Image (cartoon, helix red, strand yellow):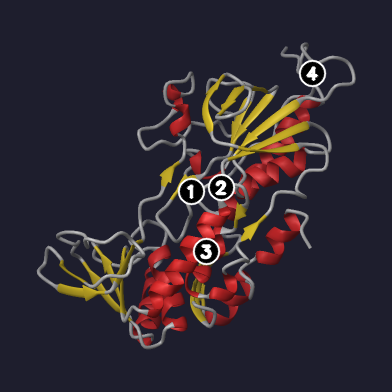
Amino acid sequence: MTQYVQLDTLKENTMARVVVIGGGYGGITVAKGLDPIAEVVLVEQKDQFVHHAAALRAAVDEVWEQAIFMPYTNLLTRGRFVHGTVSRVEGTTVHVYGHDPIEADYLVFATGSTYPFPAKYSSSNSAVARARLAQLHENFKGARSVMLVGGGTVGIEFAGELAHTFPGMEIIIVEKEDTILSSPGYSEELREEISAQLAELGIRVITGSELAFLPPHNVGELGHFQVSTLGGEQIEGDIWFQCYGAAANTGYLHGTDYEEFLHPNGTLRVKKSLQVVGHERSYAVGDLTDVRESKRADAARQQARVVIANLSALIAGEPPEAVYEPTKEWVILPLGPNMGASQLVDAEGVSRIVGADQTMEIKGADLMVSVIRSQLNLP
């Protein structure tokens, strides 16, 4: 029978060290949850937390420019925050550029995924990210038309934000599939409701043909362009954005003993316990896992609770018995602050569509900024 005991290498009265790599939604949940019982080290390449769930609102509304950036200062009471970029991980030893290697008793991967600007920010410096956001606001003032390439949830939500803030702007969504929201899991009723609202907002939607070539400017840059779809439809615009292309952020695991457990798409293989396959003392949460569900902040937080339970058990010398079961997925899709629709699923698995009022009630008037600030122990 397997005995689960505290590590032999730990001296009496010392705490197990848990290194959490990544300070997104899942990472901060794990770090805060284990802070009372472990020596937690949170390693994050960004100097401040970025509330990506509100990033598209911040992209169009200057009032939100500061609201999505929040310091990590108050998150941990006993543990510490390390601002740095992980170069590689060997077993449970974490190598961070500019820092000594950090030895861990347990390791949690929570580095999430990358996504094109402005849904996510690549800069590690919040001042640089803010400057890019301020420049985007200036660029919008000179734009009469915007093209969004991708008709999934990001492209649609961004279109709604643009339409609300710039009512005279021409907005075009280009989706290569035959319908918007083409990924599995979206009901036809939701597509119809969102399509009707997009039409009400005057947003032009082109489906069934991808672009023959991309504009010559970078995303978010102001500059008139002309492009065409493979179907021959002509599009003119002043600014454009790529609204597709999420990728698991696991590049630092290539060339390590974790590489064989990466899928071709970069996601990391985990068990139902969220333990990394082949690594007893390593766990993973959020977008970088191969859990078969959509990548959402609430899913990352739910996974984090399973990891907290399992690591708490291990630290106490007990078997880790918590498992993660993907929940019935809700789709919450606001179109600006006043419109949108959601696909809700009840306990029996029956889905229903609700409109703008309930969508705003679920997402919250502040897009959950107050919830995240509370989690980070900020006023």
Lower sequence index among marks 2 and 4: 4
- Type of amino acid under label 2: Pro
First reached walking from the N terminus: tag 4 or tag 3: 4
Local crowd at mark 4 within 10 Å, few (<14), some, or many (≥20)?
some
* Real-space Cα separation, disc 2 to disc 3, in angstroms: 25 Å
Mark 4 and mark 3 in contact? Answer it, CB < 8 Å: no
The kind of residue tagged 1 is Glu
Q: Residue at x 46, y 61 (%)?
A: 132
Q: Quadrant of the C terminus?
A: bottom right
Q: Are marks 2 and 1 in contact (CB under 8 Å)?
A: yes
Q: Residue at x 82, y 43 (%)?
A: 77
Q: Mark 2 — residue?
A: 326
Q: Please, what secondary structure does the residue beneath circle 2 have?
A: loop
Q: Position of residue 65 (x, y in %)?
A: 57, 68
Q: Are marks 1 and 3 in contact (CB under 8 Å)?
A: no
> Separation of disc 2 and disc 4 at Cα?
30 Å
Residue drawn 78% across the image and 43% down it: 76
For label 3, the residue is 55
Sequence-wise, which precedes: disc 1 or disc 3? 3
Residue for badge 4 = 6
- Is residue 202 toward the left or the right of residue 283 in the image? left
Query: Of the residues tagged 2 and 4, which is closer to the observer?
Result: 4
